[in-house]
Image (cartoon, rainbow, N blue to C red):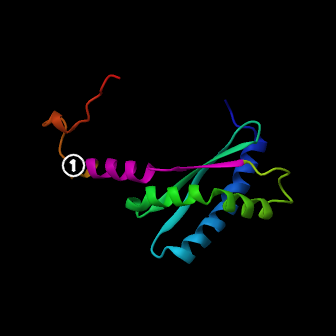
Amino acid sequence: MEETNRQRKIAGVLQKDLVDVLQKAAQDGMKGVIISVSKVHVTSDLGIAKVYLSVFPSNKRDEIIEGVKSNTPLIRHEMASRTKHQLRRMPELLFFGDDTLDYNEGIDRSLKGEDENPIKNPEVLPRHQKK
């Protein structure tokens, strides 16, 4: 279903303010970690916002996402105070890791010929398992 103009505007406001909140937290506690908000999707009833976070270095992604999830009430409160003149009700925030950069890096390695060729060695391909 197509996103409405209102959903896109709210997602943009949330994304902009979340970047400020999360980067400030990263500066205070985690040196050398970059957190960016790659995408925000807001449901049609404006009750839930799915936030996709991109973390560099990627080996700390799961740890950072879990930390953000555990601090969701504090983040939501900070966001509500920042957006009180723009939003009547702060949507519930759901955080997810964004692995797009890893996927792009894998494609780039394959195109450069750095990965093993699956045509010559089909064993490197992941096997599809029936459930």
- Asked if residue 82 lies left or right of residue 131, the reply is right
Q: Residue furthest left?
A: 120
Q: Which x, y percent locates residue 81?
A: 79, 64
The residue depicted at 44 percent of the width and 50 percent of the height is 99
The residue depicted at 84 percent of the width and 56 percent of the height is 86
Q: Amino acid at mark 1?
A: Asp
Magenta residues (range) = 92-110
Query: In terms of depth relative to the viewer, which is nearer, 119 or 19?
Result: 19
The quadrant in which the N terminus is found is: top right
Q: Quadrant of residue 84?
A: bottom right
The residue depicted at 53 percent of the width and 60 percent of the height is 67
User: Does the segment drawn in magenta span residue 77?
Assistant: no
Q: Which x, y percent locates residue 129?
A: 30, 26
Q: Which x, y percent locates residue 71?
A: 61, 60
The quadrant in which the C terminus is found is: top left
Q: Residue furthest top?
A: 130
Q: Is residue 1 placed above or below 96 in the rendered structure?
A: above
Query: In terms of depth relative to the viewer, which is nearer, 60 or 39?
Result: 60
Q: Secondary structure at mark 1?
A: loop
- Asked if residue 109 lies left or right of residue 96, the reply is left
- Report which residue position mark 1 lands on: 115
Q: Which x, y percent locates residue 103?
A: 38, 48
The residue depicted at 53 percent of the width and 64 percent of the height is 35
Query: In terms of depth relative to the viewer, which is nearer, 130 or 56?
Result: 130
Counting other residues with Cα less than 10 Å from the Cα at mark 1, is it few (<14), some (14-19), or many (20 or more)?
few
Total number of numbered discs in the rendering: 1
User: Does the segment drawn in magenta span residue 105?
Assistant: yes
